[in-house]
Image (spheres, grey):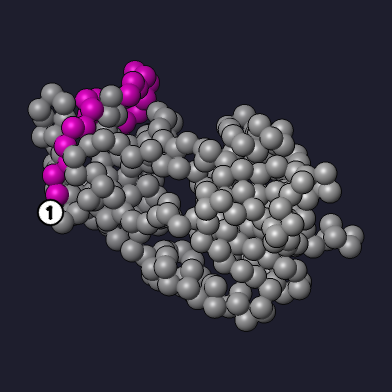
Amino acid sequence: MENQKSELCDVLIIGSGPAGMEAALVLARTRKKIIVLDAPTLPRNFAANEVHNFLGMDGFPPSKIREISWQQINVYNQAQLIKETATDITKNSAGLFVIKTEEEKTYLARNLLLAFGFIDEYPEVAGFMECWGKTIFPCPFCDGYENRDREWGIIKQSEEEMIHFANISQNWTPRNKVLLNGKAMSTKGREILKQRGTKIYDERIIKIHHVDGVLHGLTLENDQHVELESILWTLPERASPLVRKLVQNLKIELNPKGYIKINEFKETSVPGIWAAGDIQGWVGAIQAAAAGEAAAVAMTHKWFG
């Protein structure tokens, strides 16, 4: 039997990024009781000083966007923002979702929105973290303009992406080099880059040289020095442990890429659970917000539809 003191809400949202906050705003305006669980750990974009391509808030710090968002949600007096980390999700005999947190609290919800992202895996390379979010960045649309006209290194997770981003990076800079960082590349791929005049470096990176996060070169494992000023670097990622719990406890389905499977209305294979934002793969802030709105609207149609 569940603890009778467990708080019940119409929708519990896990994650307080753009997807979660936008959903909370929409649901507050539909007069639903909402709990937003905001893990008291660093967000995925902790190193970003500014958010870009977010209409009306371009150049705002992420913390400022969160502050403004919560102020606007709070006007409707329907949502609670709770600094706790969800660790387990089950369903009770009454058909309610039971959410347990690392802080040893339990919440009950009629519906869930999963609005948390994946976890980046940072390389163990000296100098990387000091430059991350400044002159090392994962998205050219987010930070390319701030690194314009600098000499870029390109590190991606697949050969196709390496070639593609070596090409489109020319929107921001005419100078780039592909850093395989120990990964293989086909003869065909090498030929394509050679024809474009792009240099390729095979060896792993062992050190990044910088001054206060401003990169000016790196050293490879063969002791070769490569002069660079910025790196477009997409990191490998892993799922949150909570995704494994959802698969284990509720048999939620994943798609072939390992992301939670959803339909066109953002609903998962488990009725009453929706997903939006980075949990579906990388998206920009405004795209994540749009997905959060779509999920909230779909929920509302379900209640009285």
Is residue 226 left or right of 142 when viewed as pictured? left
Q: What stretch is highlighted in magenta?
A: 183-210
Does 262 sit left or right of 194 as displayed?
Answer: right
| Mark 1 crowdedness (10 Å alpha carbons): few <14, some 14-19, many ≥20 | few
Q: Nearer the viewer, residue 9 or 154?
A: 9
- As drawn, the residue found furthest toward the bottom would be 75
The quarter holding residue 152 reads top left
Q: In terms of secondary structure, where does tag 1 sit?
A: strand
Q: Nearer the viewer, residue 95 or 22?
A: 95
**Residue 296 seen in this snapshot:** no
Closest to the observer: 149 or 29?
29
| Circle 1: residue type | Val
At x 13%, y 44%, the residue is 209
x and y percentages locating residue 194 in the rendered image:
28, 29
Q: x, y (%) of residue 293? A: 67, 62
On the rendered structure, is 236 left or right of 83? Answer: left
**Residue denoted by label 1:** 211
Q: Determine if the magenta segment contains residue 235.
A: no
Q: Does the magenta stretch include residue 191?
A: yes
What residue is rendered at 47% in x and 36% in y? 238
Which quadrant of the figure contains the C terminus? bottom right
Q: In this view, does 73 lie above or below 262?
A: below
Taking 234 as reference, is 2 left or right?
Answer: right
Residue that sits furthest to the top in the current view = 187
In percent of width and height, residue 72 lies at: 58, 78
